[in-house]
Image (cartoon, rainbow, N blue to C red):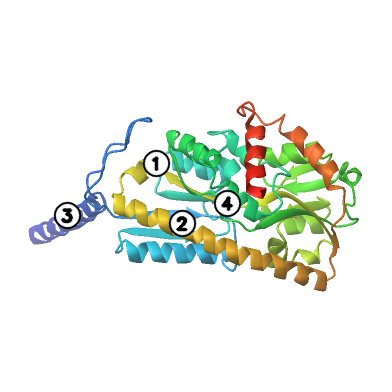
Amino acid sequence: MNKKIILLALCAALVVSIFSACAGQQAAPATPAQPATPGEPAPVVTEAESFVLNLSHVFTPMQTKHQTLEEVAQRIYERSEGTIVIHIFPDGQLPTGRDGVEQVVRGSYFINMFDPGAMADWVPDFNALIGPMLYQSTAEYSAMCQTDFAQSLKDRAYEQGIKVLALDFNFGMRNVATVNSPVTSIDDMAGLIIRTPNSQLWIDTFQALGASPVAIAWAELYNALQTGVVDAFESSLSDMVDNMMWEVSNYVTMTSHFAGTGAAMMSRDIWERMTPEQQAIIQEEFTEGARRNNERSMADELAARATLEERGMEFIDEFGVEDFRARAAEAFETFPNLTPGVLDVIMAELENIRA
């Protein structure tokens, strides 16, 4: 009996020592540098630490954006010699949008990929950057992302704990699709029950256009159209193809009311724990990834219109765009806490871009 007791005690001690060793291995990264105080230079890290980051987005694994992000993650892993690992979770499996920004601000090992407006609670002028009826193409929006104005927004985000890696992972201009009747003028927007993301920017915009927006998760949209919960939705043409929306809608009005885009953002505190070499790798690959993604997305959009027309959807190109722009301008008055005169700054930048 005594031998059995001694043997059991030895086994228990061995198990405890193994778990303690494992826990010690997990908790033994290089000592991190202290986060910089806003306005002060970040400490220089010289010893490489290993990082495992989760990246969340709402697209399917078959879509261009996901596939490009997989490439970005692989190139970062290879160039960093395995010290930066990025696991990608599509279809909104992990938090996205504002919830994703919360994860970033809290210092999680997390990259949020979502519309820049998700950062508006921290930097309100992001709502102005992606405001309604501003851009004629995603190329114009990408050019805007290279301006001093866009850089100032990224700097302000950094002060709030958000390192913006890219602002323009584009996926096409967003347009209005309807089930029962086409939108041929601003009058047809009156009372239109339209699905929008759960974003105050979208809700305010479509209310200004006269519609009745309803925030519904994208995964629930197909059924909502099928059962008549909503009459319409808005998205890029490639999204409509990838989700077979021709089965539940019949008309597309080419409003181009928003540039469909995503911003990649991570924690400033995690960023400052990386060596300058690691920072350069992750920044270069996200910048280059956005460029490749945008080239592919432009091709996707051209092909998508042809596919939707083949599937029987009718396109409306003439709808009184100036009336839409006039109404959309009113939405800017409802966006909270915008910097006075920010719309004038954006329009001046657009004039330079178009020139």
Q: Earlier in the sequence, mark 3 or mark 2?
A: 3
Q: Position of residue 128 (x, y in %)?
A: 64, 37
Mark closer to the chain start, 1 or 3: 3
For the residue pair 239 and 92, the one nearer the viewer reads as 239
**Element under disc 3:** helix
Disc 1 marks a residue whose amino acid type is: Arg
Distance CA(mark 4)–CA(mark 1): 18 Å
Q: What's the distance in space between the residues labelled 3 and 2, CA to CA?
A: 42 Å
Q: Nearer the viewer, mark 1 or mark 2?
A: 2
Q: Which residue is mark 1?
A: 268
Q: Which is in the foreground here, disc 3 or disc 4?
A: 4
Q: Is residue 130 left or right of residue 223?
A: left
- Identify residue type, mark 4: Gly
Give the camera-side residue of 18 and 176.
176
Q: Which residue is mark 3?
A: 17
**For residue 245, what is the image quadrant?**
bottom right
Quarter of the picture holding the N terminus:
bottom left
Mark 2 = which residue? 286
- Label 4 element class: loop
Which residue is situated farthest in the front direction here? 355
Residue 262 is labelled as 4
Which element type, helix, strand or loop, lies under badge 1?
A: helix
| Closer to viewer: mark 3 or mark 2 | 2
Precedes in sequence: disc 4 or disc 1: 4
Residue 134 falls in which quadrant of the image? Answer: top right
Q: Residue at x 58, y 33 (%)?
A: 124
